Image (tube, helix red, strand yellow):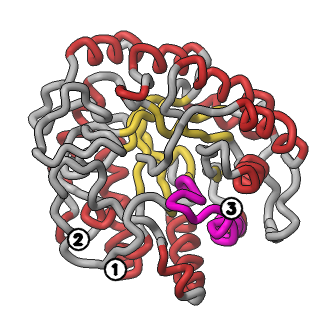
């Protein structure tokens, strides 16, 4: 799920993570002060928390009947039958956790109903022995959105209907911060002690879509709001681009546990791991697996298991998000690509690759 030119980490990024980032591990960026109510978790706190989970493995999940976060969570299109069926398929191959995106607009329209639907989702997932990692904000894909009926998928185009949160609206109207603070604190307070939730991924890929450091004020505020609530679950925002050094420093300094994205080949992925290990905290890979980019189950998932790194690949079931197509390779005729970019299952529950399913089940002990 990326709008980027390259995903390969350059040596400069590794140097940044090990040196300049580590030097600021216990401080915040001086240009954006964060009046933290509690401190960032220590290494000991983070590692003690991680012990309870064992090896987390799963997918970035949206039901195949939803094109974006709003279609997933709005009352009119909240599809518990599909969620239940598809999480059952995940359980059947030994996946035990999902990363799921929320959206503030669905909450703004109906905050009570939204929280009830989130609780319903958690109940379904828990029935399948699946924990959840929730994402609050996101800088990827469409900058505009509205409540109500969502667009139909554009033929052969990856994530044609996915929406940012809050997107361009925040940069056009700073009063939106008031709503976003209420949303963040309401959700985190309501689920602050929920043991079905692994952690709060406060901001997916801040700085993407050309925002750069324009995303830093919201990033800093959501960490602040989260610490004011102080839920039992950790707060984190994953590093993802070598070019956003200021954001990288801030994210690594303020995350209770280290999360990251890597869609590259094993050698490159191992460089990320080696660098981020220097922080001494648990590692959680919240996005990987883009087959045509050299990131696959057979060459990445075993590495993550061996090193006890939580592993969330993008996509479970092929559906309206069109993520079987690559980010930058649209197929206007809508034909199925020979090699799927993301996703594991077809909509009828049959696997894209029986060999992959066998490997996943072997690694999960299913």
Q: Relative to residue 352, is residue 245 drawn left or right?
A: right
Quickly name the residue at label 2.
75
Along the viewing direction, whichever of 291 and 204 lies nearer the viewer: 291
Q: Secondary structure at mark 3?
A: loop
| Image quarter of the C terminus | top left
Residue at (67, 24) in percent of width and height: 271
Along the viewing direction, whichever of 328 and 39 lies nearer the viewer: 328
Compared with 326, 164 (above or below) is below
* Cα gap from disc 1 to disc 2, whole angstroms: 9 Å
Pointers 1 and 2 in contact (C-beta within 8 Å): yes
Q: Quadrant of residue 192?
A: bottom right
Q: Relative to residue 356, is residue 51 drawn left or right?
A: right
Q: Secondary structure at mark 1?
A: loop
Quickly name the residue at label 3.
230
Q: Relative to residue 45, is residue 30 drawn left or right?
A: right
Compared with 33, 64 (above or below) is above
Residue at (29, 37) in percent of width and height: 316
Classed neighbour count for the residue bearing mark 2: other residues with Cα under 10 Å, few (<14), some (14–19), many (≥20): some
* Cα gap from disc 3 to disc 1, whole angstroms: 24 Å
Residue range (magenta): 204-225
Residue at (30, 64) in percent of width and height: 73
> Is residue 298 rendered magenta in the image?
no
- Measured as percent of width and height from the top left, residue 243 is found at 67, 48
- Measured as percent of width and height from the top left, residue 338 is found at 19, 26
Classed neighbour count for the residue bearing mark 3: other residues with Cα under 10 Å, few (<14), some (14–19), many (≥20): many
Mark 3 vs mark 2, foreground winner is 2
Q: Earlier in the sequence, mark 1 or mark 2?
A: 2
Compared with 149, 93 (above or below) is above
* Cα gap from disc 3 to disc 2, whole angstroms: 29 Å
Quickly name the residue at label 1.
110
């Amino acid at each position: 799920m990326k709008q980027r030119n390259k995903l390969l980490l350059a040596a400069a990024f590794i140097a940044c993570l090990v040196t300049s980032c580590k030097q600021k591990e216990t401080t915040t960026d001086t240009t954006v002060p964060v009046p933290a109510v509690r401190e960032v978790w220590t290494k000991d706190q983070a590692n003690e928390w991680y012990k309870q989970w064992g090896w987390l493995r799963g997918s970035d999940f949206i039901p195949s009947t939803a094109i974006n976060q709003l279609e997933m969570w709005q009352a009119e299109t909240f599809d518990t039958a599909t969620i239940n069926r598809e999480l059952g398929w995940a359980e059947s191959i030994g996946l035990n956790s999902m990363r799921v995106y929320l959206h503030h607009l669905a909450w703004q329209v109906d905050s009570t109903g939204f929280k009830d639907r989130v609780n319903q989702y958690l109940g379904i997932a828990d029935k399948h022995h699946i924990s959840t990692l929730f994402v609050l904000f996101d800088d990827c894909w469409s900058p505009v959105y509205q409540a109500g009926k969502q667009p139909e998928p554009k033929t052969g185009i990856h994530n044609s209907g996915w929406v940012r949160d809050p997107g361009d609206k925040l940069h056009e109207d700073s009063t939106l911060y008031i709503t976003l603070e209420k949303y963040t604190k309401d959700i985190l307070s309501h689920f602050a002690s929920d043991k079905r939730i692994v952690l709060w991924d406060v901001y997916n890929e801040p700085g993407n879509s050309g925002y750069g450091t324009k995303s830093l004020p919201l990033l800093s505020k959501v960490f602040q709001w989260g610490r004011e609530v102080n839920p039992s679950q950790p707060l984190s925002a994953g590093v993802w681009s070598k070019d956003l050094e200021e954001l990288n420093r801030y994210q690594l300094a303020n995350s209770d546990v280290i999360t990251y994205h890597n869609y590259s080949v094993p050698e490159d992925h191992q460089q990320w791991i080696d660098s981020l290990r220097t922080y001494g905290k648990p590692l959680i890979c919240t996005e990987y697996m883009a087959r045509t980019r050299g990131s696959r189950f057979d060459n990445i998932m075993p590495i993550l298991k061996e090193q006890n790194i939580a592993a969330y690949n993008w996509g479970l079931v092929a559906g309206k998000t069109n993520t079987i197509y690559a980010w930058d390779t649209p197929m206007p005729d809508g034909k199925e690509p020979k090699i799927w970019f993301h996703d594991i299952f077809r909509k009828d529950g049959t696997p894209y690759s029986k060999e992959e399913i066998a490997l996943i089940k072997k690694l999960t002990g299913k």
